[in-house]
Image: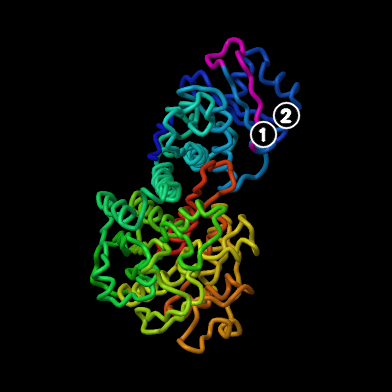
Amino acid sequence: MPLSLDVQFTALDAAVQATTALLAGTDAKLGATAGAMDQRSGGTLTNAIKAAEFKGKLKATIEVLAPPKLDASRLIIAGAAGELEENDQVSLGGAIYAAITARKIKAASIVVDMAGASAEFAADIAYGALLRSYTWHRKSKKSDDDKSSGNGLQKLVIHCAKPTAAEAAFESRRGIAEGVALARDLVNEPPNELGPLQFADRIAQMSGSGLEIEILDEVRLRELKMGALLGVAQGSARPARVAIMTWNGLGASGSKSKRTKPVCFIGKGVTFDTGGISLKPGAGMEDMKGDMGGAACVTGLMLALAKRKANVNAVGLVGLVENMPSGTAQRPGDIVTSMSGQTIEIINTDAEGRLVLADVLWYAEDRFKPRFMIDLATLTGAIMVALGKENAGLFSNNDKLVSELRAAGHATGELVWHMPLSKAYDKLIDSRFADMKNTGGRHGGAITAAQFLQRFVRDVPWAHLDVAGTAMDSAKTDINTSWGSGWGVRLLDRLVAEHYEKG
């Protein structure tokens, strides 16, 4: 759903809305503007802080109703104690939004007046609130107490010392938030409305953002000999597609310098995964509408890069298929030939995402000669056994890329954990009949899946992110209450911004 919250910035001395949030630091110390409001109200805020034994703990809140002699009829005091890192500030914005919308209102103010609060701080507060405002539902009737709707909040005014600078800082964040929202939308969509063709159509509609869009249809995929990807799709009545999104932030230069070579992102887009002939258990199968979370992230990321006019050349590719059981579906025991020419024995048709990625990885490196490739996929349940839902699994052939991704994850709160790759695991996917098997069995399942993918990467720095635990069925956070998280958009945008836009 489009982000509809109207975020505005204004001066600290501007009139506040009837519902206003104030910040309190260590020991509940109020900023100058909030302190003046306290004085005008005869110490009402100070008395409420004492009565609640409020210490200013980060994201803790208290509510003051009908304070005397103030324009605001409802005040929320939010804790902001400690040395806040960027992600703390963003999360604080989300927490304040939740406190504000606990009651049904249409407009609210947040006063960012703590000593030393920068324009970036104010922008982060607004950014967190905007991320938290996202909703998705298809209910024919919405109950009045449906908190997911933000209870009707339409306008949020941020009062700060440098509103013009804060608004400028927020603009790039707004673009990233739009990319996150798109990724969430795609994951949340029901599979009857988002098959490979519909997903490709959604991407085609993004051409107005400045992205160049190319859709490879089934005829073209056969010409390219993407036998691994097409093998997954052959059981479905819905044909496969590969969508390519290109952002030429440095211009379509003919130069072949390292800086103008694109960064490249690849996403698994299995729009619904029954497991194929190796059918999944029925319980929970409805969640497999989210098996395109990697493709959703790549799509959202490319929109974010275009929206904020990133100073980089980038390409995003998503392999879009549906994995269904039918009379035409591939079978365990089949051998398919990938675009690379390598042959793959199908052991389990539910190990399908790696087949899709194998062909798209090979195609991306062959055509675009990128600076690096990062693929994202809801690939294995094994990664959730290892890491739960707090970290995505990170596999890579390049230590520099690992370091950059871990730093970006720390900054954004989208955490990754470095997992091993080793030739010792290769024997688990060696086949008697083909170049490899598509699964190595139960033990080390996330690792053998990554080992499989590595066989389709040649000389380029590469990382694989297994996002099975983070992209869908998300744990609720201060900035997301949606089933689809949009995980990875902020992480990868930060990676690009910090390391690949500056030279």
- Locate the N terminus by quadrant: top left
Q: Secondary structure at mark 1?
A: loop
For residue 263, say whether it is visible.
no
Q: Residue at x 49, y 55 (%)?
A: 288
Residue sitting nearer the eye, 169 or 488: 488
Q: Residue 259, located in which quarter of the rendered image?
A: bottom left
- Residue at figure coordinates x 64%, y 74% from the top left: 443
Q: In the image, which residues are magenta? A: 59-73
Q: Position of residue 155 (x, y in %)?
A: 43, 27
Q: Which residue carries the number 2 mark?
A: 54
Pick out the residue farthest to the bottom. Answer: 432
Query: What type is the residue that disc 2 sits on?
Result: Phe
Report, in whole angstroms, how far the alpha carbon at label 2 lies from the one at label 1.
8 Å
Q: Are marks 2 and 1 in contact (CB under 8 Å)?
A: yes
Magenta-span inclusion, residue 266: no
Local packing at callout 1 (Cα closer than 10 Å; few below 14, some 14-19, many 20+) is some
Dominant secondary structure (helix, strand or loop) of the stretch shown in magenta: loop
The image shows residue 278 at horizontal and vertical percentages of 50, 68
In this figure, which residue is indicated by the disc labeled 1? 60
Name above or below for residue 210 compared with residue 441: above
Q: Given the image, on which type of amino acid does mark 1 rest?
A: Ala
Task: Residue 440: tell me if it is visible.
Answer: yes
Q: Residues within 10 Å of mark 2 (few under 14, many from 20)?
A: some
The residue tagged with tag 2: helix, strand or loop?
A: loop
